[in-house]
Each structure stands twice: as C-alpha cells, then as structure tokens.
Image (cartoon, grey):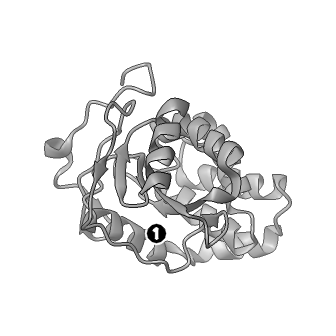
C-alpha cells in the first residue's frame, strides 16, 4: 500500500470485479485526491429512506457521501467535509451512504455500528470517533475485538450501552447497509469517497478550494 493515504490504492475495477458484498457483485477502489472539476450526471437517482443526514431538509445544496469507515482516503476526506459544515452551515445538507469495501474485514461491522449510533441520534459524533480511531480498530485481531472497540466508542460519546449493544449484536441495520451498497452500484459509484453535490459527481479527497468551487457552482444553478 502507498504510504500517503490520499493516493489511490493499487486495486482497480478489474482485480475486484468478482468480489461480493452482501450477495451483490461490487467492484470498488480507493480514490486519491480529486483531480477533476466534477461530472454532471442527470441519470443518478437516490432514495431517501432513513440514511443519516446533517443539515436542514430544505437546504439548497445536498451533498451525498458514499464512504467506508475503514477507507483511509475517506478518513482524510473528513477534513474537507468538516470545512464545508463549518463554512456553509444551513446552506448544505449531507446524506450519508455506507459502502463497505470487500477488502476491509471490519468495514461492514463499522457501518452497522454507525447505524446503531444513528438510532440514538449520534451518528455523526460516532462517525467522527470511528474515523479518528481507524488506525486502531482496523488492526483488530478478529471481529470480536473490533466489536468490543465499537461498543467502547459508543460508551465514550454517551450512548446507552445496552441499547447499542443489542442493536449491534442483532445487526439491526445490516439490510440497510447492503441496500446502500446496491444504490452505490446502481449509480456507478466505483470508488470511495465519492460525493454528489446535487447532481454533480466528485471522486476522491477534495481540498477546501475544490469544495468552495463545487458549492459555488451548485449555488449558481
């Protein structure tokens, strides 16, 4: 793996074409720094069915995030997302979509944990901590050890441990995680992170200047 987490991981569509997520074929890759000005895609279609959101429902700009908690590029991209939240406030609404990559052994667990945090109204706070601690839980020896850490993170942000643990043990939202992956596939999302600013697609880690340009363009349409 390249040492710079912003550079593309050398796994492309061909080498991953046969990997499976929840029974669906899904070819994916890491995305490096975003080098384009985005691609307008009138054919993308999204379903609002309980995905975590941040910002007012009537915000003029919607940013849909397709991410994987175990993706190192997604962790780096969080800096730009935080910048947008702080800079543009109520002008922007974020919608989260889980895309746990097949090569990440704990990504689907992390996605389920995030949904259980959302059940108690703290998805974004929990997600921040999961990204912060990614270098640790991603190196867990087994799923049981990873799950112990995810429960510990829930306690750290004040979630009800019993409710969270029951939700997590039951994999209550696993079907939703799989549905998100299918939605990503349907919209030809083949890398994480991928962002849609209204109907325009951006792939990779975006700088603050790139976010400014993307939002300015979306505002003018």
Q: Nearer the viewer, residue 104 or 41?
A: 41
Q: Which residue is more in the foreground, 16 or 202? A: 202
Residue 205, percent from left and from top: 45, 35
Q: In the drawing, does residue 90 fall left or right of residue 32?
A: right
55 relative position to 177: left or right: right
Question: Dividing the image into 4 quarters, which one contains the C terminus?
Answer: bottom left
* Residue 133 in sight from this viewpoint: no
Q: Please identify the quarter of the rendering in which residue 143 is found.
A: bottom right
Q: Secondary structure at mark 1?
A: helix
Q: How far across and down, in percent of the image, does residue 37 sit?
A: 34, 38
Residue under the point 68% across and 43% down: 87
Task: Look at 50% across and 54% down and name the residue there.
Answer: 219
Quick one: 168 or 141, which is closer to the camera?
Answer: 168
Identified at 58% across, 44% down, the residue is 81
In the image, 90 versus 135, the foreground residue is 90
Find disc 1 in the rendering and name its residue.
Answer: 177
């Amino acid at each position: 793996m390249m040492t710079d987490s912003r550079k593309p991981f050398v796994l492309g569509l061909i080498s991953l074409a046969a990997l499976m997520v929840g029974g669906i074929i899904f070819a994916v890759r890491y995305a490096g720094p975003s080098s384009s000005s985005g691609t307008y895609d009138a054919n993308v279609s999204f379903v609002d069915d309980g995905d975590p959101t941040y910002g007012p429902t009537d915000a003029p700009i919607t940013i849909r995030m397709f991410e994987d908690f175990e993706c190192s590029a997604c962790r780096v991209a969080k800096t730009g997302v935080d910048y947008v939240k702080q800079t543009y406030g109520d002008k922007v609404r974020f919608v989260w979509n889980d895309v746990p990559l097949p090569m990440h052994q704990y990504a689907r667990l992390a996605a389920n944990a995030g949904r259980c945090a959302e059940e108690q109204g703290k998805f974004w706070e929990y997600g921040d901590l999961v990204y912060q601690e990614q270098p640790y839980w991603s190196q867990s020896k087994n799923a049981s050890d990873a799950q112990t850490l995810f429960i510990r993170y829930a306690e750290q942000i004040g979630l009800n441990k019993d409710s969270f643990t029951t939700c997590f043990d039951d994999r209550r939202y696993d079907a939703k995680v799989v549905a998100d992956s299918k939605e990503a596939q349907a919209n030809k999302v083949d890398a994480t992170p991928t962002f849609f600013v209204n109907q325009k697609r951006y792939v990779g880690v975006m700088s603050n200047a790139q976010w400014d340009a993307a939002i300015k363009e979306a505002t003018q349409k």
